[in-house]
Every structure is written in structure tokens, then in C-alpha cells.
């Protein structure tokens, strides 16, 4: 009866572990799931499978990428990852408590490796391959626990090591080690471990000479960056081995000790796992997820709460404001950091230009979007492909009419799970210009794209956006908003003034608020009043800039008085930038740059 009660408690504990991991992954950090998914592309294709298992740890990597594709919808990804961690804990717990009268304490402690793995996902470059590999090794340890004779168990661990190594990678070394430790077969265990290490050298010499020998022992696919091996994987392996040693002590432990052990593990998980996730990084990844899902109102609400000051978050916010037609009315309510808060220059990494690539596609600067997205995919540090990026490149190729290249991307995406429906629909557009022109998304982008090859030159990005807006003859309101914003951020107020004559063409009889503020400042530089002003400027803005000018003249050192008038206006941004340039000794922002 006592043993039956312990089994029920163990089952309940595993259920709690699953529910806790699921809720954490789904509710706390769905952005980490979508981030991981966008740097993998799992294909239901025999060639993809055979290529994957040609290297050590290939099967674990294949299974982990199969699971990772479901992170496209975070609730599915959270379910499968939590299930994987729970299965690993159940297998290891069942193996280590086999033959024990007091099962609960050790069974609960077997959840510690899963807790450490869950916390490791706070580093976005840690891959699910290690967790999958550890589950495979735990399965082998579980099977070996039913072999009664020690020498046979050790012999089987040696004979099955190389296939397991090829499936799971170097974490397979835990298998012969833990089998020997559990059975207190120290000398046979040492011999088996030496033989297994020798087998790794033999495998490297015969089949894997293209890989450095240290990678054969550290893992090829446990971490996204080559030659980097996080310490958490060593800690997990050490805990698994330590639990094997602990399982050799067959003590009669009161049931209450099991309750204490389970409570301790749960408390440890509640404290440790959230501490592994950096708030700033989580916020940036969340902005990327929200942009990808086109959740514009959620982005604005998040920014209103957090008040971001980094360029990545501000790019996401500005895009959300523009997509809801609020950019030129609200952008200076937030702490803009210059033109890079609007659009990013080229960066050779796989994150910095995520928002910019989305913006370039939507503007549309299609060739620039294609180039930026291609660079993002080629910057993936473990040389994987991306379903998100490949779909975007196919869309760009369809828009510019390169159907032959688009077909290659579409053929590949048709073998995926979550991109295949789109691929089947997009295939009908190939070679059909009329269908593309009538498409609700691709048709307008083809019409509004430059007739010549786009250029993407950051020092003159405001002029590029201005030309793009004017060429659309009032259709491209997104480019018009971004042109105004870029001219204001770069201080090119003469171009902004010239653009104001086209407000009506873009559906704005009256210029947006921040444009009026910039034009009012531009006018007051060379005029004493607004009698002959050719722009539409509201009486409130006229009186506010007059009050600001008077305050600055009468109290030049009282910056608090300036801020009370200029708060959340273009003037506050312009004055802040002037102070920054004065402190750094750089050139002041333009005020009357010539429009070319």
C-alpha cells in the first residue's frame, strides 16, 4: 500500500512538472519559442532525414527540429517541449528508483536536470537537441535498469554506445558512466568509459574527420554558435551522474522526506527558471514576435507601458504606429534615438535587422527587403534555413517577377508543416502577372515599388523614402509617414516643408501633429510671426512654439521650463539631439538641408 501511494505521488509530481513547464513556456516566454522556430526549417522529406543523421547527434537534432517547428504556434510548442522534459524525468526517475522501497525523494530529484534545461532556454542560442539527446540516454539507462547481472549491463552499455552516440551525440557518454555508477562497478565502469572515449576517436578518424575532435566530445548541435559550449550542459550532465551515485544508497526514507524533496524541487524551479531569462532580451524578442504576428495594437500598448529606449524596440513601435496611421502624430511621445530608431543600417547578424526587413518589405523597397532577408538567413550561426525568411524571399521574388527563383523556395516550403498551405497558394501565382497584380498584398507592392532597382543608402534614406512616397501619387501612405518621420529625425526640415504640399494627396487635409511642430520650428527660424506661413499649423502649436521660444530666450539655463512646454513634441527631440551633438563635438542636426 505504501509503495502504491508513492507511485501515485510520483505520477502527480510528474504531472505538476509537465503543467508548470507548459504554462511557463506558453505564458511567460512564447517569444523564445517563435524566435527558435524562425531559425529552423523542418522538412518532411527523405533527403532532409538522411542528411540530418549523417553526423553524430543527428537523430536527436532531427527530433528536436521536428518539435521546434510546432513553436510556430506557441501553445503547441510548449506542450511538446514540456512533454519531452517530463518524459526524460520519468525515464530517469524510474531507472534510478528501480528496486527502491523509498522511491519518492530520488524520483523528485530526477526533475532537477529538466529544471536546469528549462532555465537554459533563457539563452536563445541553446538548442533543444541536448534535451532530446538526454531523453534518449535516459531511455537507455531505464532499459539497463532491468538487466540483473552487472557485467552484462556494463557489456551492453559498451556495445550499444556507438549507435547511441551517433543518435544522441557526446551526451551518450553518460550512459556507460551511469550504468557503472548505479551498479558500483567502478573498475568495469572505468574500463567501459575509456573504451567509449576510444570509440569516439575511432569514429572521428573514420567517418567525421571534417569536424574538430573537440566538437566530437562537446556536441555539434547543442548550441547554435560553433565552438561555444555553455556550462549549463556540463552541470546537467554532472547532476545526472550524481543522481546515479545517489541511487546506489538504498535507504528507508520516510514519506514526509519525499514531500520535502518534491517541495524543494518545485521551489527551486520557481526561483531558478525565471531568473535565467533576461528581461531586456525577453522584451526585444517579444517585439519581434508581435511584429511577425502583425499585432500592432499590442506593440503600442507594450511600449506605452515600458517606454523603450533601444533602437530595435523603437523600430517595432514606429512600424506599429505607422501601420495604425499614428506615426506622425505620436512618435515623439517616445524617446526616439535618431534615424536608427526608424530603420536600421545593415548588420551582419541574424537579429538586428529583423524589424527593418519587415519594414522594407511593407514600404515596399522590395529588392532591399530581399537582400536584407537573405543576409538574415545566411547569418544563422549553425547554417540552418528559416521558414520565415524563405517565405519572405519567395514573396519578394514573386513581386519582382523572378518566378524561377520563387519556385525553388516554394518547392522547399511545400514540404514543411506550417508553410505548405501558403506555398500551395503561392504556386498558382508563378508566371501569372495578372494574378499577381490582382493579389491584395502583392499587387499593390508591385505597383508601388520603384521602376528601377532600389537603393538602400542610410545617409540619404529620408530622400529615398520621399521619392518612394511621391512616386506612388498618394497610394503609399506608409512611405509618406516614414518619409516625414525620417526628415524630422534627420533634421531635413526643408524637404519636410516641400512634402507638406502633398498632404491632401495622402488623405490628410491637415498635416499630422508632429509635422506641424517641425514646420512651426522651421518657419520661426527665419520669420518673426506666422502671418504668411504656407503650412497649416494649428493655433495651439503656434502659441506653444512662441512660448517655448520666449522661455528659451528669457531663461536659457532653465531646461526644466523648456521641457514642460516641449514634452512629447518634436521640439523636445530636436533640443535633446542638439545637446548631444554639443557634448560630443559632432555636427548639429540639419535645419535647412536642401532637397534634391
Image (cartoon, rainbow, N blue to C red):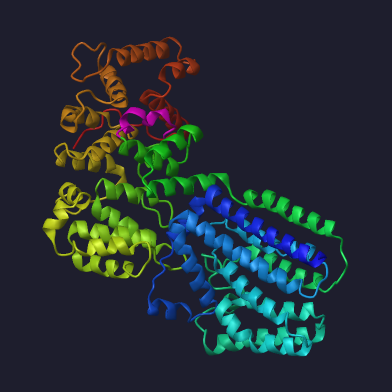
Location of the C terminus (image quadrant): top left
Q: Quadrant of the N terminus?
A: bottom right
Highlighted range, magenta: 325-337
Residue 378 lies, in percent from the top left, at: 38, 64
Q: Is residue 279 left or right of residue 509?
A: right
Q: Residue at x 21, y 52 (%)?
A: 442
Q: From the viewer's perspective, is 10 left or right of 352?
A: right
Image point (72%, 83%), residue name: 193
Can residue 339 be seen at all in this image of the molecule?
Answer: no
User: Is residue 512 found inside the magenta-colored segment of the image?
Assistant: no
Q: Position of residue 315 (x, y in %)?
A: 39, 42
Q: Residue at x 67, y 49 (%)?
A: 270
Residue 219: horizontal and vertical position, in percent?
58, 73
Vertical relation: 228 (above or below) 192 = above
Residue 389 seen by the camera: yes
Q: Residue furthest front?
A: 1
Q: Nearer the viewer, residue 595 or 502?
A: 502
Relative horizontal placement of residue 398, taking residue 287 as reference (left or right): left
Q: How many marks?
A: 0
Considering only vertical position in the picture, is 562 above or below 90?
above
Q: Quadrant of residue 474?
A: top left
Q: Which residue is drawn at the image coordinates 73% and 66% (left, top)? A: 239
Q: Nearer the viewer, residue 33 or 353?
A: 33
Residue 422, quarter of the rendered image:
bottom left
Q: Is residue 108 above or below residue 269?
A: below
Point out residue 125 in the picture as x, y percentages from the top left corner. Answer: 53, 60
Amino acid at each position: 500500500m505504501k509503495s502504491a501511494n508513492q507511485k501515485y505521488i510520483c505520477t502527480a509530481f510528474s504531472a505538476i512538472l509537465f503543467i508548470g513547464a507548459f504554462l511557463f513556456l506558453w505564458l511567460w516566454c512564447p517569444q523564445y519559442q517563435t524566435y527558435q522556430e524562425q531559425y529552423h526549417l523542418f522538412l518532411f522529406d527523405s533527403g532532409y532525414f538522411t542528411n540530418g543523421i549523417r553526423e553524430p547527434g543527428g537523430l536527436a537534432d532531427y527530433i528536436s527540429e521536428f518539435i521546434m517547428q510546432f513553436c510556430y504556434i506557441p501553445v503547441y510548442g510548449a506542450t511538446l517541449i514540456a512533454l519531452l522534459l517530463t518524459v526524460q524525468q520519468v525515464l530517469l526517475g524510474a531507472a534510478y528508483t528501480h528496486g527502491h522501497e523509498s522511491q519518492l525523494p530520488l524520483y523528485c530529484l530526477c526533475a532537477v536536470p529538466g529544471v536546469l534545461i528549462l532555465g537554459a532556454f533563457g539563452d536563445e542560442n541553446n538548442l533543444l537537441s541536448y534535451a532530446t539527446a538526454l531523453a534518449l540516454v535516459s531511455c537507455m539507462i531505464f532499459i539497463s535498469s532491468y538487466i540483473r547481472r552487472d557485467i552484462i549491463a556494463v557489456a551492453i552499455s559498451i556495445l550499444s554506445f556507438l549507435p547511441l552516440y551517433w543518435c544522441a551525440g557526446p551526451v551518450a557518454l553518460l550512459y556507460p558512466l551511469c550504468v557503472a555508477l548505479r551498479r558500483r562497478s567502478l573498475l568495469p565502469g572505468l574500463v567501459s568509459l575509456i573504451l567509449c572515449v576510444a570509440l569516439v576517436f575511432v569514429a572521428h578518424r573514420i567517418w567525421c574527420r571534417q569536424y574538430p575532435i573537440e566538437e566530437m566530445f562537446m556536441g555539434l548541435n547543442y548550441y547554435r554558435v560553433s565552438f561555444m559550449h555553455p556550462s549549463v550542459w556540463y552541470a546537467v550532465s554532472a547532476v545526472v551522474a550524481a543522481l546515479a551515485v545517489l541511487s546506489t544508497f538504498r535507504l528507508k526514507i520516510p514519506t514526509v522526506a519525499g514531500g520535502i524533496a518534491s517541495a524543494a524541487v518545485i521551489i527551486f524551479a520557481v526561483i531558478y527558471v525565471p531568473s535565467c531569462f533576461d528581461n531586456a532580451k525577453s522584451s526585444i524578442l517579444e517585439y519581434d514576435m508581435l511584429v511577425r504576428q502583425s499585432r500592432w495594437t499590442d506593440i503600442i500598448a507594450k511600449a506605452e507601458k515600458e517606454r523603450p529606449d533601444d533602437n530595435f524596440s523603437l523600430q517595432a513601435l514606429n512600424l506599429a504606429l505607422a501601420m495604425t496611421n499614428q506615426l506622425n502624430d505620436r512618435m515623439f511621445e517616445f524617446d526616439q534615438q535618431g534615424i536608427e530608431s526608424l530603420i536600421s543600417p545593415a548588420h551582419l547578424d541574424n537579429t538586428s535587422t529583423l524589424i527593418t526587413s519587415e519594414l522594407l518589405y511593407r514600404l515596399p523597397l522590395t529588392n532591399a527587403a530581399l537582400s536584407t532577408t537573405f543576409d538574415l538567413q545566411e547569418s544563422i550561426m549553425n547554417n540552418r534555413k528559416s521558414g520565415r525568411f524563405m517565405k519572405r524571399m519567395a514573396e519578394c521574388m514573386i513581386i519582382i517577377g523572378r518566378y524561377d527563383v520563387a519556385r525553388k523556395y516554394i518547392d522547399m516550403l511545400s514540404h514543411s508543416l506550417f508553410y505548405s498551405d501558403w506555398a500551395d497558394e503561392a504556386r498558382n501565382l508563378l508566371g501569372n502577372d495578372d494574378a499577381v497584380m490582382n493579389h491584395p498584398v502583392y499587387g499593390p507592392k508591385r505597383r508601388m515599388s520603384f521602376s528601377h532597382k532600389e537603393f538602400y543608402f542610410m545617409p540619404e534614406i529620408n530622400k529615398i523614402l520621399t521619392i518612394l512616397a511621391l512616386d506612388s501619387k498618394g497610394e503609399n501612405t506608409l512611405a509618406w509617414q516614414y518619409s516625414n518621420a525620417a526628415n524630422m529625425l534627420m533634421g531635413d526640415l526643408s524637404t519636410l516643408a516641400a512634402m507638406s504640399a502633398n498632404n491632401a494627396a495622402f488623405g490628410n487635409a491637415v498635416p499630422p501633429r508632429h509635422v506641424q511642430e517641425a514646420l512651426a520650428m522651421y518657419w520661426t527660424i527665419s520669420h518673426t510671426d506666422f502671418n504668411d506661413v504656407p503650412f497649416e499649423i494649428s493655433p495651439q502649436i503656434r502659441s506653444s512654439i512662441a512660448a517655448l521660444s520666449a522661455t528659451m530666450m528669457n531663461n536659457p539655463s532653465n531646461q526644466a521650463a523648456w521641457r514642460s512646454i516641449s514634452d512629447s513634441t518634436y521640439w523636445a527631440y530636436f533640443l535633446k539631439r542638439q545637446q548631444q551633438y554639443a557634448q560630443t563635438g559632432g555636427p548639429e542636426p540639419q535645419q535647412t538641408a536642401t532637397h534634391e
